Amino acid sequence: MAVQDRPQNAFLVGRVAARFIIVDGPAGTSAAFSPAEIGRLRAINQRALSILSLLAAAQPTRVPLIWGSHTTAINVEAPLLPFNPNPTQADPKEPREQPWRDEALVALVGQTGVAGLRALHAASVGGADHCVIVFWTNYECSWHAYSVDAHAKAVMCAPMFAPSRPGGSLSVAPRLVAHEIGHLFGAPDEYRGSACKVLGSGGGGFGRLDFPNFNCEVINPNSVPCLMSHNDELICDASSLRVGRQPANWRSGRLRDPGSLLMSRVLALTDSAETRDAVIAALDAAGTVGLCAWASASCPPKASTPAAWRSCPALYRQSTTPPVVRSVMSAY
């Protein structure tokens, strides 16, 4: 689950520093980890990075993905938090995170809150291109796994990885850690229960490449298995593009500048005419985005039907408020 904000990291390529913080509560309490549990969390973290590395290797880019990881176990004395009997994704995260997180941040970087998270990021990135922070805690949280893009931070709540609780089991935790790291590079959820959308709240796409959420189960009846959907150890083309991974053999376009995506043949990423129809209908229903087709001899300037869209070799979006072309010109 991602708490939407601006993405801190641009592209899941190059050198990425992964800083794992295991927050160990007061000894003898339920918030404390045993040495064996800390060892298992370390293994989970490394398995998560391996999953992302394998997915990256399956879709090679011009710049490879290289991880550098560091794990710190930090002791805190924050009071225990009451049991959370009915957690939901919509519950506020800060009230149950701030007590143990801020104490850990003071021990690590001498600051609290957003300033502390920024200081931890600065202390952790080193010579890497990007950095992510993942907290593990045995305190009761609002949800079992969530992330905040703006802080490049994810939180994993160990007590909720148990039968009858949202996480189910720690056996699925490596995929969830990988899923949350995907959020930190701009990839949105794709599963139906997240109420995913094809476009962001501002009418644009997701991630640094500004790519639509074509694999969202809400709008795509032929959604494919993907890490950002049901935590499968697979990554679909759309998710790969949303985390900024442009495959080396992908000819659909390239960036002209950080806010403008050049792409063509976008509809080729969908699997069938029915899927394209559903995606187009969802885009039309979004309201904030007017749909236009690439103006060429074979494609009218404003294709208004799915059939017209399917005949277009490329597309671009034009915002209706204000009417300014935002993105997408044909490939070079």
Image (cartoon, helix red, strand yellow):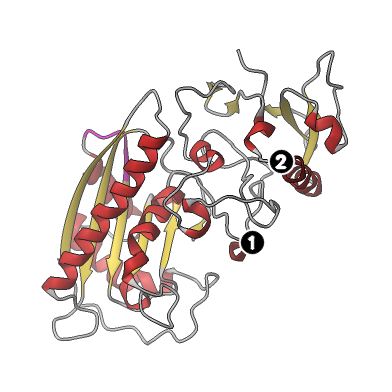
Label 1 or label 2, whichever comes before in sequence order: 1
Q: Which residue is mark 1?
A: 195
Residue at figure coordinates x 32%, y 70% from the top left? 170
In this rendering, the answer to whether 192 lies above or below 207 is: below
Q: Residue at x 31, y 53 (%)?
A: 48
- State left or right for residue 262 relative to residue 181: right
- The span shown in magenta is 127-131
Q: Which mark is residue 324?
A: none
Camera-side residue of 135 and 324: 135
Label 1 environment density (alpha carbons within 10 Å; few <14, some 14–19, many ≥20): few
Viewed as shown, does residue 194 lie left or right of 11?
right
Cα separation, mark 1 vs mark 2, equals 23 Å
Residue 86 percent location from the top left of the image: 50, 84
Q: Quadrant of residue 270?
A: top right
- Image: 271 above or below 294: below
Per the image, the residue denoted by label 2 is 272
User: For the stretch drawn in magenta, what is the main secondary structure?
Assistant: loop
Q: Quick one: SS at disc 1?
A: loop
Image-based side of 267 in relation to 17, left or right: right
Instruction: Residue type at mark 1: give it.
Output: Ala
Label 2 is placed on what type of residue?
Ser
Q: Is residue 102 shown to the viewer in this render?
A: yes
Q: Residue at x 43, y 80 (%)?
A: 165
